[in-house]
Image: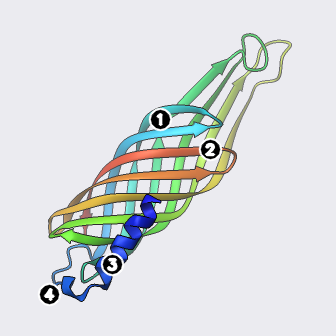
Amino acid sequence: MRTLILAALFATAAASPALAQPAGNAPFTGLRIEGLVGYDHVKNHGYGDNAVAYGLGAGYDMQMGRAVVGGEVEYMDSNAKGCDTDFAAIGDKICGSARRDLYAGARVGAEVSPGMLLYAKAGYTNARIATRYDGVTGGPASFSDKTNLDGVRVGAGAEYAFSPNSFIKAEYRYSNYEKGVSRQQVLGGFGFRF
């Protein structure tokens, strides 16, 4: 619901000719690269872990007046891990950990004040989850597995261009994957625009 409200506000700002900027003054146009780090909460069928997420992103934005639209890709990783003992037999152990997370999507936003962009985003995400089971004698056999999960991500954020070629950002995002896996992240970032 929040994303729909933000999208409506961005559309209103983009449609208003009174908000148009002079030609050549578009701080949110061009190729960008960024580093990201922050809070990661991975959840699987009610069990969750709080962790640190980190990664790299790249994108290309076009600013038209106050409106900004663009595409982006990311490679993220996380130290999220959870273990349980006595899972299938007394003395066994099973562990799951979040691995790489790939994302491709789009964002739409509005420059709400000079150098300040508010935006909403949505796209496809693919996360890898690793599982390791250490069995005991007379119980189920030990195994390890890596599973790739498809999903969808939505989010919203703010980006501030503090120079013509560099910016900082803060972002909240929610990802929903197959097999009951989801994650919520609150990230900060620093990047360069070319």
Provide the secondary structure element on which disc 3 rests. Answer: helix
**C-alpha distance separating marks 3 and 1:** 40 Å
Say what amino acid the circle numbered 1 marks. Answer: Asn
In percent of width and height, residue 192 lies at 24, 63
- The circle drawn on residue 12 is 3
Left or right: residue 189 versus residue 46 is: left
User: How many C-alpha atoms fall within 10 Å of the one at disc 3: few (<14), some, or many (≥20)?
Assistant: few
**C-alpha distance separating marks 1 and 2:** 16 Å
- The circle drawn on residue 22 is 4
In percent of width and height, residue 7 lies at 40, 70
Q: Nearer the viewer, residue 83 or 112?
A: 112
Left or right: residue 24 versus residue 152 is: left
Q: Nearer the viewer, residue 191 or 106?
A: 106
- Image point 76% across, 10% down: which residue? 90
Residue of label 1: 79
The tag earlier along the polypeptide, 2 or 3, is 3
Provide the secondary structure element on which disc 4 rests. Answer: loop
Provide the secondary structure element on which disc 1 rests. Answer: loop
